[in-house]
Image (cartoon, rainbow, N blue to C red):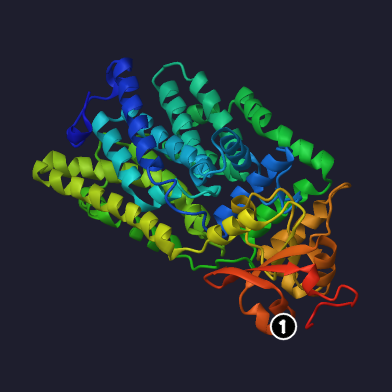
């Protein structure tokens, strides 16, 4: 076996006769290394806002009301994304308890799946040296390290996209070599079904585009026909379709909202958050791979491909894989850093190939390769440490104070905001009341937390309470009915609403305040609370 320390030395391919036991042994070592590294700081920082608070909050709600089938946000159906992330998170929280590291099980699984898929593909069809170099490069990328501990859907779907491409490529290479391939092809389709359940159609569209373009470039039409396997398509639908059918039957209009509004309109339209120029992702990837970037440049300069590596080789697969996904996510106006995570495994593979070329010719560069991995790993750890020391926004302290003081019958009200992490940290079981100007159509049309909440009303089937949407005029009534209401909002709201001076200011966290409003401090016989 090639030890990780000798990862820059040429090795034999498993496809060329290496024992299967050697592949399994290397796989176990790679899995253990990946798991420990990606998990090591998953507990160290609070949930970040808005993404981690939102998605963990939805999973927390599912765990409280016991309906794992329908994701809910503040008690109402939330269909921005499919349910796989929530299912994994709910299971993890149920097994391990409501800790932040348990809440990050889904991205950790996604990171492990992506890293291991890349490693096993290169270990089988290239060399152990390439596989180890790619794995360590990928794990040391700060964006991959942090993404594997960031509780949103991006790393989970990135891992499943990576696994689908790797399994499909393995099936194609097996078929070309006259080896049994159906089991791996079935795995690729099953993984695509899980990818659809993780984040929608990109779970099949991106792997399909990558594999078809890679095979099409070398005119491998017979192999393309082999991959277009009807039983595999049926298996993919068996994995993902039942949930979509169940939601459409229960909530008419669901399929239009999910596929047209959340897929097509978000991809092709404007008016969404995080509008960025076309060059945004190349700049992100440049920064994300900076410690290893010199290897990519030095190893690929001159002749790009060796004669032995035609379009059917893995070098071309890695390049097509990277380019297709980069182009796909660069087209929409709305761009988030996490969207580009599926490009990191092929980029790590390309860096590994370049790295291998350099040290094969000049072994003296090996120590600098190890140094670049160490620098990348240090940056990832430093990013997590910076956030845990207060660089990000969190309501953890206020929410825990609320959990300690609140009685079961007390109400919880959000004032002109919705803090996604409060239900998780405060261990709330019921929806919160949200005070906002819900009659302002322009305000509700903008891509924001308000629109997210407002859209849930469209799927409020019978038996679901929509009274959480309130205006400022409702506060006094709520406090009089509940005797005690806990309010969370910007500390500056007390200037615009002097009646908040009658409330007890319990604490603040940055600009967010927690008030306790007692009915005894109000004139419950009078009407109206605004400006009182």
Q: Position of residue 383 (x, y in %)?
A: 37, 57
Residue furthest toward the front? Answer: 520
Neighbour class for label 1 at 10 Å: few (<14), some, many (≥20)? some
Q: Position of residue 69 (x, y in %)?
A: 72, 38
Q: Quadrant of the C terminus?
A: bottom right
Q: Position of residue 371 (x, y in %)?
A: 19, 49
Image mark count: 1
Q: Quadrant of the N terminus?
A: top left
Residue 522 lies left or right of residue 310; in this view the side is right
Q: Nearer the viewer, residue 420 or 79?
A: 420
Q: Which residue is mark 1?
A: 498
Q: Quadrant of residue 520?
A: bottom right
Q: Quadrant of residue 67?
A: top right
Q: Residue at x 48, y 37 (%)?
A: 109
Q: Residue at x 58, y 45 (%)?
A: 202
> In this view of the protein, can residue 305 be seen by the observer?
no
> In this view of the protein, can residue 370 be seen by the observer?
yes
Q: Position of residue 303 (x, y in %)?
A: 22, 47
Residue 297 lies left or right of residue 526; in this view the side is left
Mark 1: secondary structure:
helix
Q: Residue at x 26, y 41 (%)?
A: 353
Q: Nearer the viewer, residue 321 or 99?
A: 99
């Amino acid at each position: 076996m090639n030890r990780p320390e000798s990862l820059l030395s040429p090795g034999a391919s498993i496809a060329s006769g290496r024992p299967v036991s050697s592949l399994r042994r290397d796989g176990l070592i790679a899995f253990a290394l990946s798991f420990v590294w990606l998990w090591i700081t998953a507990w160290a920082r609070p949930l970040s806002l808005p993404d981690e608070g939102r998605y963990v909050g939805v999973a927390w709600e599912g765990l409280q009301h016991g309906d794992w089938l329908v994701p809910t946000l503040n008690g109402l159906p939330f269909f921005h994304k499919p349910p796989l992330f929530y299912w994994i998170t709910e299971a993890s929280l149920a097994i391990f308890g409501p800790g932040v590291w348990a809440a990050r099980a889904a991205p950790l699984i996604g990171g492990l799946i992506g890293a291991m898929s890349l490693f096993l593909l290169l270990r089988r069809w290239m060399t152990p040296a390439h596989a180890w170099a790619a794995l360590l490069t990928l794990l040391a990328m700060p964006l991959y390290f942090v993404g594997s501990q960031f509780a949103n859907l991006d790393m989970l779907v990135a891992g499943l996209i990576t696994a689908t491409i790797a399994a499909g490529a393995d099936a194609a290479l097996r078929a070309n070599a006259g080896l049994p391939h159906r089991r791996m092809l079935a795995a690729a389709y099953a993984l695509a079904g899980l990818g659809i359940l993780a984040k929608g159609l990109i779970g099949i569209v991106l792997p399909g585009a990558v594999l078809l373009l890679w095979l099409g470039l070398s005119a491998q039409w017979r192999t393309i026909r082999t991959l277009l396997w009807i039983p595999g398509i049926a298996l993919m639908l068996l994995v993902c379709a039942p949930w979509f059918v169940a939601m459409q039957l229960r909530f008419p209009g669901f399929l239009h909202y999910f596929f047209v509004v959340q897929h097509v309109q978000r991809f092709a339209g404007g008016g969404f958050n995080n509008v960025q120029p076309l060059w945004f992702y190349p700049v992100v990837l440049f920064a994300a791979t900076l410690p290893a970037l010199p290897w990519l440049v030095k190893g690929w300069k001159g002749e790009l491909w060796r004669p032995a590596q035609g379009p059917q080789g893995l070098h071309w697969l890695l390049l097509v894989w990277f380019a297709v996904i980069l182009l796909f996510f660069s087209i929409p106006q709305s761009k988030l850093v996490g969207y580009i995570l599926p490009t990191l495994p092929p980029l790590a593979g390309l860096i590994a190939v370049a790295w291998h070329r350099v040290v094969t010719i000049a072994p003296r560069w090996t120590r600098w390769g190890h140094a670049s991995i160490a620098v990348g790993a240090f940056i990832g750890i430093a990013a997590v440490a910076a956030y845990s020391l207060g660089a990000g926004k969190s309501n953890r302290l206020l929410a825990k104070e609320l959990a300690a003081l609140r009685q079961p019958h007390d109400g919880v009200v959000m004032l002109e905001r919705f803090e996604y992490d409060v239900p998780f940290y405060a261990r709330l079981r019921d929806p919160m009341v949200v005070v906002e100007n819900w009659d302002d159509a322009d305000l509700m049309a903008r891509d924001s937390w308000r629109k997210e909440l407002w859209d849930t009303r469209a799927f409020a089937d019978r038996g679901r309470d929509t009274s959480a949407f309130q205006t400022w005029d409702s506060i006094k009534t709520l406090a009089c009915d509940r005797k005690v209401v806990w309010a969370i909002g910007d500390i500056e709201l007390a200037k615009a609403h002097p009646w908040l001076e009658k409330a007890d200011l319990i604490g603040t966290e940055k600009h967010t305040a927690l008030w306790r409003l007692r009915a005894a401090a109000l004139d419950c016989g009078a009407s109206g609370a605004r400006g009182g």
